[in-house]
Image (tube, coloured by chain):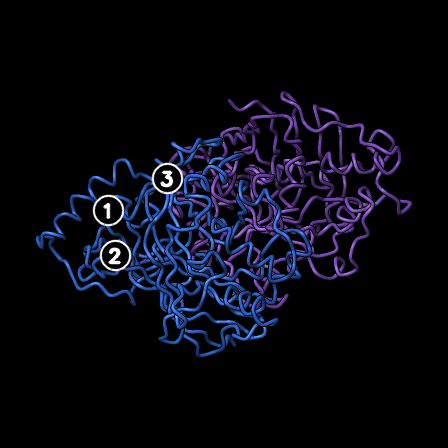
Chain colours: A blue, B purple
């Protein structure tokens, strides 16, 4: 089933079920007022949600209405946890290579993960407002899962069973603030402002064969100002699958229901094994500007593509084999914050 | 007024008001079911809570009962944000000195802050369960504030006005996991397991002269296995006050109501300006084991005090000028997690 959160109601919005084709929705607030409330009591709540979803799909749900992604908040408008891995080690290796640094061999076996801020996510179509272009504003297209409770020390099978929902993320990053923050040693903070998630969160069973229990095998379609920018397959070159990322996060503490775990920027190597080529050159492109800039640096000695400017538009979406949008689109413009 | 969260009810517990002397409590769930709910609507909720607190103080609150810290969860059992500064730069300088590294001059003007996990806090008297002593289990005694909504880019005055509550923290740390995580460049994750907060959260006005709007001028009493271990004054040697930490956190994103901002380990220099001496030597002692180990390393070439072992007990408390416990005590034993 597919779930979304409408802007009506309080800080956590109002839970709705959405039809598979994303055209119709029905209020689910009679079952659980919010998505977090549903996740808090998933074992009891999910069967009722599934029954209502079946009614919606069959056209017999009372009070169904046209679904509008622009009326959505992020599925969890605020969450108790958002942590983000760097599962596409290809991306990490490129970052290092572009600055002439070797990547430690352990990065292929020990996941990189940072703790993100989760108190104030952007809506899927909300502008990215920033005080200055000089921050080096970038998008990062990613896949994320939402977990149920995960006990401390969970093994991979337990972690896999705890995956309740899948969605997309734009993990907005401020590239020019990163070097100073990482040099301080405590990780990202100001360089990772509010993220935005896809309008719709989807249960793994509704993803069909594209979901193998650990990875989502579909291209992540990224467009910049209406032009195709990336179509890397999220199931390819993902060194650490979601159960591995969840188990990593749960090594020394439990994760509470509603924890969001991100994949890191989706990134594929070129067919030839080298750094990916732009979509316009027949390649799979990129899921963030930093990566094309790294490739440009490797090829030409310097970056050519600028970071985002006020007025730029980013769109992040995924389509299934039939061309149907799976999660709806994240579609954001960059605006000056005053 | 003083607020606490009882273990009854759901994941977020049940809100109670507590008398100034911490002997009596009364349910506040008729006003707001949980502390987060109260913070979400503070402007409307606070006056009602204050009226009930006055009734409790005057002995005329219906249904009042004996307050028991052992029945408490952390005031926010789960929160949308927990971020922790390192405001006592003395502590940071000692860490560096003990490993022979100079501290960048910018550390005196640009706060260190990390994003912590906030989905599963320990109760104030809940054991610290860890799979292995080899993680290097340590406590960190700190002060924290809880904010209302803070707009992105807030100035210091706006940040100061957003402080709603003050409490204590045990920011549990796994010292032996830190070097590898910081070397990876993305900050703490597994090395910062669940934190615990004091049983009671206190509004700034109820702290009297000890609260100056930015710092809390009282000794933080830390005991290890019943022996005094630290009594550093939280108002002394705090390089960055809470409004400065909040403004730092809010530079590129808003903070949502209920965000918790920590001070970092409370640490005072010795009266002579050198590293602090143990309480048993007439000094102010320490608020974490890492600091005494650093001082031992500087003085003797190696650490002598071990990290926490299964069975060890940590107590963190603050008393006002009359000896009254302000926040109740965090009191935790270390246990093996199986």
Q: Which residue is mark 2?
A: A320
Q: Which residue is mark 3?
A: A148
* Residue at the top extreme of this rendering: B311
- The vertical placement of A79 against A154, above or below, is below
Chain of the residue where label 1 is placed in the rendered structure = A
Q: In x, y percent, where is residue A230?
A: 39, 65
* Residue at the right extreme of this rendering: B272
Q: In x, y percent, where is residue A301?
A: 61, 71
Q: Disc 3 on helix, strand or loop?
A: loop
- The vertical placement of A19 against A331, above or below, is above
Q: In x, y percent, where is residue B164?
A: 55, 54
Is residue A11 found left or right of A55 in the rendered image? right
Of mark 1 and mark 3, the one earlier in the sequence is: 3
Of mark 1 and mark 2, the one earlier in the sequence is: 1
Looking at the rendering, which quadrant does residue A327 occupy?
Answer: bottom left
Q: CA distance from mark 1 to mark 3?
A: 20 Å
Q: A325 or B129: which is nearer to us?
A: A325
Chain of the residue where label 3 is placed in the rendered structure = A
Rendered residue at 38%/35% (across/down): B9
Same subunit, labels 1 and 2: the answer reads yes
Q: In x, y percent, where is residue B185?
A: 62, 50
The reply to whether residue B163 is in sight is yes
Is residue B125 found left or right of A270 in the rendered image? right
Label 1 with label 3: CB-CB less than 8 Å: no
Q: Which residue is mark 1?
A: A208
Same subunit, labels 1 and 3: the answer reads yes
Q: Disc 1 on helix, strand or loop?
A: helix
* Residue at the front extreme of this rendering: A272
Label 2 with label 3: CB-CB less than 8 Å: no
Of mark 2 and mark 3, the one earlier in the sequence is: 3
Label 1 with label 2: CB-CB less than 8 Å: yes
Q: CA distance from mark 2 to mark 3?
A: 25 Å
């Amino acid at each position: 089933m597919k779930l979304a959160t409408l802007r009506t109601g309080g800080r956590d919005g109002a839970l709705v079920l959405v039809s598979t084709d994303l055209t119709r929705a029905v209020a689910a607030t009679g079952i659980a007022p919010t998505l977090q409330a549903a996740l808090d009591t998933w074992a009891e709540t999910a069967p009722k949600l599934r029954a209502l979803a079946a009614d919606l799909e069959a056209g017999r749900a009372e009070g169904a209405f046209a679904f509008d992604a622009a009326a959505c908040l992020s599925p969890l408008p605020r969450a108790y946890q958002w942590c983000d891995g760097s599962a596409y080690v290809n991306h990490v290796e490129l970052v290092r290579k572009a600055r002439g640094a070797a990547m430690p061999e352990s990065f292929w076996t020990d996941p990189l993960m940072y703790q993100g801020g989760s108190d104030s996510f952007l809506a899927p179509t909300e502008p990215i407002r920033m005080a200055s272009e000089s921050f080096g504003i970038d998008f990062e297209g990613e896949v994320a899962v939402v977990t149920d409770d995960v006990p401390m020390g969970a093994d991979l099978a337990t972690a896999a069973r705890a995956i309740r929902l899948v969605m997309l993320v734009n993990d907005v990053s401020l590239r020019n603030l990163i070097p100073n923050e990482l040099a301080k040693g405590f990780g990202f903070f100001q360089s990772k402002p509010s993220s935005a998630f896809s309008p719709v969160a989807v249960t793994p069973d509704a993803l069909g064969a594209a979901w193998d229990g650990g990875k989502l095998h579909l291209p992540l379609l990224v467009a910049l100002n209406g032009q195709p920018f990336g179509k890397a397959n999220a199931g390819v070159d993902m060194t650490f699958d979601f159960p591995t990322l969840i188990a990593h996060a749960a090594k020394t503490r439990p994760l509470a229901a509603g924890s969001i775990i991100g994949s890191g920027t989706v990134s594929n190597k070129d067919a030839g094994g080298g750094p990916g080529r732009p979509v316009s050159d027949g390649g799979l492109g990129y899921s963030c500007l930093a990566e094309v800039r790294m490739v440009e640096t490797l090829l030409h000695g310097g970056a050519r593509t600028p970071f985002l400017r006020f007025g730029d538009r980013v769109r992040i979406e995924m389509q299934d084999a039939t061309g149907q949008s799976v999660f709806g689109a994240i579609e954001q413009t960059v605006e000056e914050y005053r």
